[in-house]
Image (cartoon, grey):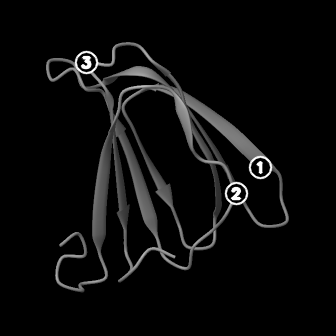
Amino acid sequence: DQSFGNKNFALTWWAISEPFEMVSETHSHDFDQFLLFVGGDIKNMVDLGGEVELTLGEKGGELEKFVFTTATMVYIPAGLLHCPLNFKKVNNPNKPILFHDLFFAGEYK
């Protein structure tokens, strides 16, 4: 059970082995969220093994695109606009980018 017994916490994860745009629409939630990106090389997890683009911004303000190639954790407070989330490059499909989505709500909406 990914919701940990309805404790208003959930954790999901994916192994990203090829480039794709995971989420295209900019949106926000009424809960806090953490996005964690880690490299799939167990001996060097700081090296992301690819390139990820994530857009963030305040409602009514400019959106800013962030690009990263090293392990990164992004805190997204409730109400912050985020996405598109685009996995632009994966260097080695045998060492995928490990993507974790942690959020503080009973359900994702």
Disc 1, SS: strand
Decide: is 93 above or below 30.
Answer: above
Q: Earlier in the sequence, mark 3 or mark 1?
A: 1
Q: Earlier in the sequence, mark 2 or mark 1?
A: 2
Residue that badge 2 annotates: 26
Decide: is 38 above or below 78.
Answer: above
Disc 3, SS: loop
Q: CA distance from mark 2 to mark 1?
A: 9 Å
Which residue: 63% across, 72% down?
A: 79
Image position, residue 75 (x, y; %) = 47, 56
Q: CA distance from mark 3 to mark 1?
A: 33 Å
Classify mark 2: residues with Cα within 10 Å, few (<14), some (14-19) or many (20+).
some
Give the camera-side residue of 45 and 86.
86
Classify mark 3: residues with Cα within 10 Å, few (<14), some (14-19) or many (20+).
few
Q: Nearer the viewer, mark 3 or mark 2?
A: 3
Residue that badge 1 annotates: 63
Choose top left, top right, bottom left or bottom right for residue 67.
top right
Label 2 amino acid? Thr
Label 1 amino acid? Leu
Choose top left, top right, bottom left or bottom right for residue 98.
top left
Which residue: 46% across, 70% down?
A: 32
Q: Nearer the viewer, mark 3 or mark 1?
A: 3
In the picture, the disc for residue 86 is none
In the picture, the disc for residue 94 is 3
Image position, residue 80 (x, y; %) = 63, 65
In the displayed structure image, the side of residue 109 where residue 80 appears, left or right: right
Q: CA distance from mark 3 to mark 2?
A: 30 Å
Q: Earlier in the sequence, mark 3 or mark 2?
A: 2
Location of the N terminus by quadrant is bottom left
Decide: is 13 above or below 86.
Answer: below
Which residue: 14% across, 18% down?
A: 43
